[in-house]
Image (cartoon, rainbow, N blue to C red):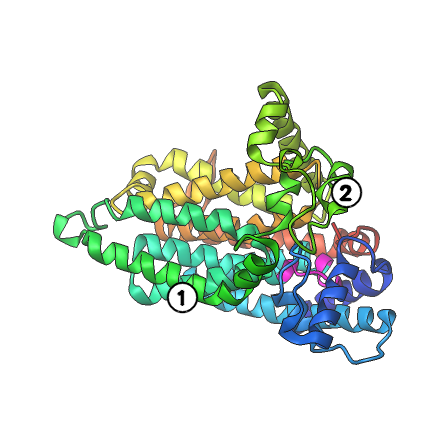
Amino acid sequence: MGLLLTVYLAGAVVQGFRINLDMHRTDQSAYMDYARGIATKGFAYVGDRARMPVYPFLQSLLYRPGMSDDEFFRRGKALNIGLSVVLLFLTYVLLSRWLEPLAATAIVLVTAFTVFAFKAGYFQCELLFYFFNLVFFVLCIENLRRPTASRAALLGVAAGVAYLTKPSVVPGIVLFLVCYAWASMARGDSGPARRTPSPLSSAGRAAIFVLVFLAVVYPYIRTSKHVFGRYFYNVTSTFYFWYDSWDEAERGTKAHGDRIGWPRMPAEDLPSARKYWKDHTLSQMTARVGNGIATVFKVAWSSYGYLKYAAIYVLFALLFIAQHRRRAREFLFHGRASAATIFVISYFACYLLLYSWYTPIADGNRLTLSLFLPGLAAIGYFLARVAGPLPLRLAALRLTTAGLHRFVLAVLCLDLIFVLPWAITHLSGAD
């Protein structure tokens, strides 16, 4: 572990201090401005509603009056590298309790060397959001399969902190509430009707989740309502999502003050879902989604190397389901488990569509990588509870789940020797 940590830190430092020399790339200077504003004005600083406050608050602790941009940039990158190590450790703690230790080890090491090492040396909130989003995702599944009041409260905290890190968590919150309503009507996991939670208890847990979430985010959304006119105001989801390009967004609401208040534009010119539907044909919208999906996979294919590991786990899971259909069906669609399964499927499908739609505005890895840890965790959870010692038969080969994780670790070792030294010194983790 000491050797792996040394290799990881060496790669992160190369990215942060040899590759990442432009603070104006991919929102880094904007996060610096936000952190500087919090450091000088405290919680009275409103922000621009393009970024959220949790990460800038952490970085603001480093800022001192009179500090130059270059010095703040260097210190912020160093802090983010240290933070990435802490987040990887916490990710292992979480996954080792949810999965078997070998699975947690494989997933965390793959994440460390194909995602975190490339993004740790940047003044960005992504790694913090990836962790909080994973916690939110895991707690969603736990609340759907085994709901309790305490889990609902924890989910509310996780959802609130994730939202205050990046508002991308909102569609996941909506999907969870829909699936929870479905789960409240399903039979208990063991079948008897007496195990079915009463509508009142289900509604009570849902209320706990919503109330805790609102309590966590209320100071922020209250300011949004006062300054911008809406509680859940964010320039990306409110306006930019409905433009056809970033240049169009810059000429539109961004040029008319959408980051200091409600944009000063005629109401009929403001972008919205209704206006987009009116101004575009169905074929144009379909083409945007199709091109976006192709772009997402093209970017992932040419990026840091994480895609092949996702493909290995997905392929193994699909082949296992094909060979053990009855066992998989009983786990995935029995009682309350059906709601959790629907949540997982709809979660990845929904976010893939949303990120694909947004590619004309931004098409880097930063958005889609938020699905990487939840995806591997979901597959690991399924395999740990369904596959166990059962093998996957490929001709004469018999591969168990433990063998799968060992195979992934072997591939990662080859990557560390033959791929990572070149990739970490030539590819940028900014996008």
Assign the N terminus to one quadrant of the image.
Answer: bottom right
Q: Is residue 353 left or right of residue 153?
A: right
The residue identified by callout 2 is 250
Q: Is residue 126 magenta-colored?
A: yes
| Of the image marks 1 and 2, the number of the one nearer the N terminus | 1
In contact (CB < 8 Å): disc 1 and disc 2: no
Q: Label 2 neighbourhood size at 10 Å, few (<14), some (14-19), many (20+)?
A: few
Residue drawn where x is 69% and y is 56% of the image: 260
Report the front residue among 43 and 209. Answer: 43
Local SS, label 2: helix
Q: Does residue 156 lie above or below 265 as drawn?
A: below
Q: Identity of the amino acid at label 1?
A: Leu
Magenta stretch: give its range: 118-127
Q: Does residue 346 lie above or below 283 as drawn?
A: below
Q: From the top left corner, tell me how far across and down residue 429 is, in percent.
A: 75, 54
Q: For the residues carrying marks 1 and 2, which lies nearer the camera in this image?
A: 2
Q: Is residue 30 left or right of residue 96?
A: right
Q: Is residue 234 visible?
A: yes
Q: Label 1 neighbourhood size at 10 Å, few (<14), some (14-19), many (20+)?
A: many
Local SS, label 1: helix
Residue drawn where x is 63% and y is 36% of the image: 271
Q: Is residue 331 visible?
A: no
Q: From the top left corner, tell me how far across and down residue 369 is, in percent.
A: 62, 49
Q: From the top left corner, tell me how far across and down residue 358 is, in percent.
A: 64, 38
State how far apart marks 1 and 2 are (Cα): 39 Å
Q: Main secondary structure of the magenta part?
A: loop
Q: Is residue 343 magenta-colored?
A: no
Q: Is residue 280 left or right of residue 347?
A: right
Q: Does residue 85 lie above or below 418 as drawn?
A: below
The residue identified by callout 1 is 154
Q: On the image, which quarter does residue 34 sit in?
A: bottom right
Q: Identity of the amino acid at label 2?
A: Glu
